[in-house]
Image: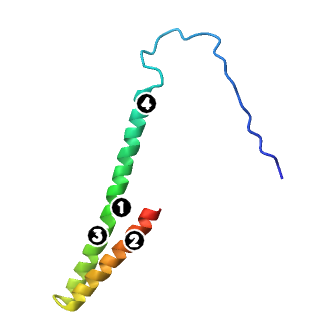
């Protein structure tokens, strides 16, 4: 079995920069921009995760009403939709 090898490189700056970048050290602006973009993507993803179970409930309730009308079968289909939506929500959250 081959051994892993991780080389380390050290760089030394021999000459200072010739012009000022006029930014504070650490480039906080880049960090805040990337953090903001990541938060926005996560917010969109979370929105769709929450929308999927609601759509499943509406779909099953609609199908139940279409098939059974205002009978007990409609309620049973809506309950099945709620149970399935909860199961899918748990699966999505675990990912």
The span from disc 4 to disc 1 (Cα, nearest Å) is 29 Å
Q: Which mark is residue 88?
A: 2
Tag 1 and tag 2, C-beta contact below 8 Å? no
Q: Secondary structure at mark 1?
A: helix
Q: Is residue 69 above or below residue 92?
A: below
For marks 4 and 1, the one nearer the N-term is: 4
The residue under the point 32% across, 57% down is 47
Q: Label 2 near label 3: C-beta < 8 Å? A: no
* Mark earlier in primary sequence (3, 1): 1
At numbered mark 3, what does the secondary structure look like: helix, strand or loop?
helix
Residue at the disc numbered 4: 30
For residue 23, what is the image quadrant? top left
Q: CA distance from mark 2 to mark 4?
A: 37 Å
Disc assigned to residue 49: 1
Give how far across and how far down residue 80 sits, in percent. 32, 82
Q: Judge whether 46 appears above or below 69 on screen.
A: above
Vertical placement of 55 versus 28: above or below? below
Dot 2 or dot 4: first in sequence order is 4
> Residue 58 location in percent, x, y?
25, 74
Between residue 18 and residue 36, name the one nearer to us. Answer: 36
**Residue 95: assigned label:** none
Which sits earlier in the primary sequence, circle 1 or circle 2? 1
Numbered tag placed on residue 55 in the rendering? 3
**SS for dot 4:** helix
Q: Residues within 10 Å of mark 4 (few under 14, many from 20)?
A: few
The answer to which of 63 and 43 lies nearer the viewer is 43
Instruction: Report the Cα–Cα distance between label 3 and label 1.
Output: 11 Å
């Amino acid at each position: 079995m081959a051994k892993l090898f991780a080389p380390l490189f050290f760089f030394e700056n021999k000459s200072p920069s010739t012009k000022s970048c006029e930014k504070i050290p650490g480039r906080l602006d880049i960090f805040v921009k990337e953090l903001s973009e990541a938060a926005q993507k996560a917010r969109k993803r979370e929105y769709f995760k929450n929308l999927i179970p609601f759509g499943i409930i509406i779909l099953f309730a609609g199908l139940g009403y279409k098939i059974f009308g205002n009978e007990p079968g409609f309620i049973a289909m809506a309950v099945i939709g709620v149970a399935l939506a909860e199961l899918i929500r748990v699966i999505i959250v675990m990912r």
